[in-house]
Image (cartoon, rainbow, N blue to C red):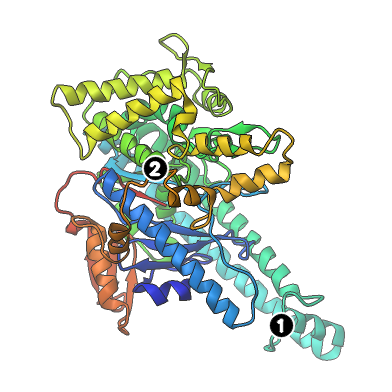
Amino acid sequence: MSHALKMRVRTRAGERRMQRRQLFTENGGSVSYEALPWALDGGLVEGGTPECRGPGQLMLYQRAQDAMLLTAARDASCLLAERGFAGEVGLLKNCRDAQGNVYGAQENYELPLAHKSGLWLYRTGLLVLLPLVVATVAVTWLLLLTLMGVALGLLLTLSIVGVFIPPVSRWLASLGLDGEDPPAPEQPGGLPRVLEKKLGRAAYLFELCVWGPVMSLFSWWLMATAFRRHRKALLSFLVTRSVVTGAGTVLADGSFALSEKAPSIVRVMRATPLSVDRAIYDTGNLLKHLSEPTLLQFSKLIALFRPRQRMQLGLSDSNVAQLAEYLKIGTTSLLVDLADAGLLHDAPTLARPIEALQTIVRDPTLQATVEFSKSKPATALQVQRWYCERAKAVLDRGGVTPMNATEIVRLWGEALDALEDDPNSLVGRLDWVTKRYLLETAGADASEAVLKKIDLKYHELGDGYLARMESIGAAPTLVSAADVEAAIRSPPDGTPAFARGRLVKQLANSGADAVISWDRVRIGHRFGGKVIRLADYRTSDRPSDGGHED
């Protein structure tokens, strides 16, 4: 896939961390292969759009990413065919597979982490944690060196014993530890794949045991100090927005849910580094920075002291209907700005947010009510209506006016009206409505396998059910093919992605030693090389309204 991608656009390798293999592209975005350490052959392609300054721009670059990956998949199919492999490479843009595994979409919005005294309180707590971070780094290296010494000693002992005991020698050969090539994984007794999985799981458990305590402490400190104004103002909106932005899914029991991601959400904000600790507000991006000194990387740890950070939303579906995606990023970025201005201080407060989320996403009739701490029960549509009307009132009196705000509020209100009066009028426009319609037309006697095929096929890039609807005009498109083609090769102006994309173009075919990441580019050797900080290339200090999506 990466080879096929390089045939179409200029790329440059990003930071490499164990199982992560990342390419940055000439439009400033990235593509990487994500997999668990013990399941490297069962990963997924993760695309990250470049940073954008508004919902319209982010919408365009999300579609450009889809088009770029679709072309790369088709090229990969041709390359494999030339090598004698049958079949085609296809891509699903979704968040839940046929076995119920959850992955996928996240949204990132750059905001002030806290204001005034709250920021200093956060920084003070981080400073208090630093000695523990240093101690954990020391423990990590001590344990690693000890384990390496034990492993080398054991290997040396076994090698000596193997000279006299042939079965031990043959066993070492099967593992590929005798200097010879190991047997292919698909051959009987192919232990390297088994060993790889065991070592991967052991590495994960090792990291969790060593870094778990300090990361959990940092998680709790983030709960107490980070994004408090935005979290409080936006929580009820995020819990209920699946009625507009959900992708829809068939659950294991055969029932229909409005969202693919929501059924797996277990808390409001992440409390541990565990991958199963899925939250509405996901701080995993910040937790990763804490352990960077283990690899003698200190820039990201220092970056945790910055006043602006990325607020990452773990509760987000992968939309393929363009109107649904535009409303997702448009309404959220608009409300982020209103919350930042203190204009949502009286937003409704849910009594039990996670319970409310599960109730809402399992009710496609949209009639279920949820409890609030200071107001009477309400439906998800009523909550969405409150936020929509507040945004409209602010715009009417000439308050905060982000890009495309008037259009977003109009489309938002029209979608809520249609959901209340005739949801099926939104077929082709909202994902969950369209998917439910397709599932219902399959017939009441459709098998579980047929329903799940529809569920998954809906999300296929290029040949999925929604893509076919777009091709015949049954689903509206908001961006032109010409603009999408241009966005594949041109980064968005006024963002860090502009400098990153330009540098990727310059470095793509050069032999220069360079390391590219989201926040900086280092050219030359680690000591004495030139470091370009991408945040310096913003045209304004204003937050990127649309952030970027992974």
Disc 1, SS: loop
Image vertical order of residue 358 relative to residue 511, above or below: above
Crowd around label 2: few <14 · some 14–19 · many ≥20 (10 Å): many
**Residue named by callout 1:** 182
Regarding residue 250, the answer to whether it shows in the image is: no
How far from the left and from the top, in percent, is residue 433? 51, 34
Q: How many marks?
A: 2
Q: Nearer the viewer, residue 516 or 206?
A: 516
How far from the left and from the top, in percent, is residue 206? 60, 57
Q: Nearer the viewer, residue 251 or 266?
A: 251
Q: Earlier in the sequence, mark 2 or mark 1?
A: 1
Q: Residue at x 56, y 27 (%)?
A: 358
Q: Amino acid at mark 2?
A: Glu
Residue positioned most to the bottom: 163
**Residue named by callout 2:** 325
- Left or right, 85 with reference to 106: right
Q: Which mark is in front, 2 or 1?
A: 2
How far from the left and from the top, in percent, is residue 215? 48, 46
Crowd around label 1: few <14 · some 14–19 · many ≥20 (10 Å): some
Disc 2, SS: helix
- Quadrant of the rendered structure where residue 128 is? top left
How far from the left and from the top, in percent, is residue 397? 14, 22
Real-space Cα distance between discs 2 and 1?
Answer: 47 Å
Q: Residue at x 37, y 53 (%)?
A: 62
Q: Nearer the viewer, residue 116 or 267?
A: 267
Image vertical order of residue 36 relative to residue 469, above or below: below
Residue positioned most to the top: 376
Image vertical order of residue 114 relative to residue 149, above or below: above
Q: Amino acid at mark 1?
A: Pro
